[in-house]
Image (cartoon, helix red, strand yellow):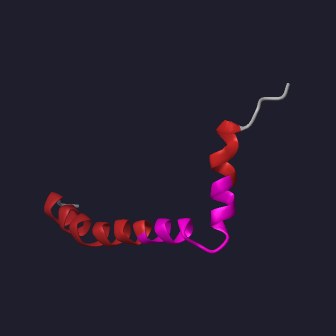
């Protein structure tokens, strides 16, 4: 492959792939039911260590 061809591919489809990944990550974080899991994970450092 030529460098210019690879650069053109990355400029067009690479940008689309990164944008879709970003939208998917936001949708995953804001999906229904994720607040409970996020709150539980946020409390982990505050829990007492019981050995």
Residue drawn at (29%, 68%) of the image: 15
Residue drawn at (16%, 58%) of the image: 3
Please state the extent of the stretch shown in magenta in the rendering: 23-39
Instruction: Using residue 41 as the reference point, say whether residue 26 is left or right of it.
Output: left
Residue drawn at (43%, 67%) of the image: 21
Image quadrant holding the N terminus, namely bottom left
Residue occupying the far right of the picture: 51
Relative vertical location of residue 46 with respect to residue 27 in this rendering, above or below? above
Relative vertical location of residue 38 with respect to residue 45 in this rendering, above or below? below
Residue drawn at (68%, 59%) of the image: 37
Relative vertical location of residue 48 with respect to residue 11 in this rendering, above or below? above
Image quadrant holding the C terminus, namely top right
Relative vertical location of residue 32 with respect to residue 25 in this rendering, above or below? below
Instruction: Using residue 17 as the reference point, say whether residue 42 is left or right of it.
Output: right
Residue 47 placed where, x, y %? 73, 37
The total of numbered circles placed on residues is 0
Residue occupying the far top of the picture: 51
Which of the two residues, 19 or 7, is positioned nearer the viewer here? 19
Residue 2 placed where, x, y %? 17, 60
Residue 18 placed where, x, y %? 36, 65
| 29 falls in the magenta region | yes
Quarter holding residue 35: bottom right
Which of the two residues, 30 or 19, is positioned nearer the viewer here? 30
- Main structural element of the magenta stretch: helix, strand or loop? helix
Instruction: Using residue 33 as the reference point, say whether residue 28 is left or right of it.
Output: left
């Amino acid at each position: 492959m030529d460098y210019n061809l690879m650069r053109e591919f990355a400029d067009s489809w690479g940008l689309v792939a990164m944008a879709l990944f970003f939208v998917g990550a936001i949708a995953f974080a804001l999906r229904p039911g994720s607040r409970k899991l996020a709150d539980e994970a946020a409390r982990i450092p505050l829990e007492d260590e019981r050995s």
